[in-house]
Image (cartoon, rainbow, N blue to C red):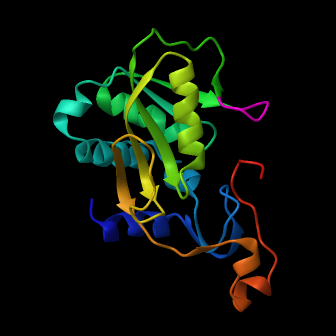
């Protein structure tokens, strides 16, 4: 899928929002990508997962033993990536503020994991998920996402394969441009800041 095709998919389901948004990273933006809307259709979610899978080198794909994604945003695309790769899809969650495996999920020591996110902006959630996976005995061999909002600048400590790289500007709360400062921010994501 090309960048234009992917953005057309977002627009077709009103998943590319414009306004003033407070992102899960704590930064502000005039744009928000609502991946839950993009992935609400199972057929579309499957196509997106297959497109991401094709970005990952074949030899690396063949090593993946399990896909793990952070809750909430990564669960749907993580599940579809598991389907595309023919492996189980688990998720980490943080009911007490720290990611961990729950619900009876566990990893055998040395299990090779692909960590999958919906949107990566600063990489904080991804790095926290990777740390939780490693603390549970897994070895994260790569990460993938639908969108990399850092336009390639984020560092996760493992090879990273986003479907699309975008550079929508983000701002710290004390650096807002006048048009954003004049409006109240909406917090559409699942993470409490």
Picture coordinates of residue 110, whole percent (x, y): 40, 14
Residue beneath the point at 36% across and 49% down: 48
Residue beneath the point at 48% across and 70% down: 11
Q: Nearer the viewer, residue 87 or 64?
A: 64
Q: Nearer the viewer, residue 36 or 139?
A: 139
Picture coordinates of residue 97, whole percent (x, y): 76, 35
In this view, 22 is above or below 30: above
Magenta: main secondary structure: loop
Left or right of 96 on screen, residue 114? left
Left or right of 35 on screen, residue 175? right
Left or right of 59 on screen, residue 121? right
In this view, 178 is above or below 166: below
Q: Residue furthest bottom?
A: 178
Q: Nearer the viewer, residue 74 or 193?
A: 193
Q: Nearer the viewer, residue 154 or 180?
A: 154
Residue 91 location, quadrant: top right
- Range of residues picked out in magenta: 94-99
Picture coordinates of residue 141, whole percent (x, y): 35, 31
Residue 18 location, quadrant: bottom right
Picture coordinates of residue 1, whole percent (x, y): 27, 59
């Amino acid at each position: 899928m090309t960048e234009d095709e992917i953005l057309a998919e977002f627009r077709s389901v009103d998943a590319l929002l414009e306004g003033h948004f407070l992102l899960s990273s704590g930064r502000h933006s005039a744009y928000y990508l609502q991946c839950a809307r993009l992935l609400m259709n199972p057929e579309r979610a499957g196509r997106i997962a297959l497109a991401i899978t094709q970005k990952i080198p074949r030899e690396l794909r063949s090593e993946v033993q399990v896909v793990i994604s952070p809750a909430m945003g990564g669960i749907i695309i993580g599940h579809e990536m598991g389907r595309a790769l023919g492996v189980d899809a688990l998720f980490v969650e943080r009911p007490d503020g720290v990611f961990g495996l729950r619900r009876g999920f566990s990893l055998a020591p040395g299990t090779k994991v692909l960590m999958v996110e919906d949107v990566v902006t600063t990489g904080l959630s991804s790095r926290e998920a990777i740390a939780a996976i490693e603390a549970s005995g897994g070895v994260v061999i790569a990460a993938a996402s639908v969108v990399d909002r850092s336009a390639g600048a984020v560092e996760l400590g493992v090879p990273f394969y986003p479907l699309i790289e975008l550079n929508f500007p983000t701002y710290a709360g004390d650096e807002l441009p006048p048009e954003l400062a004049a409006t109240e921010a909406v917090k559409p994501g699942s993470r409490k800041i």
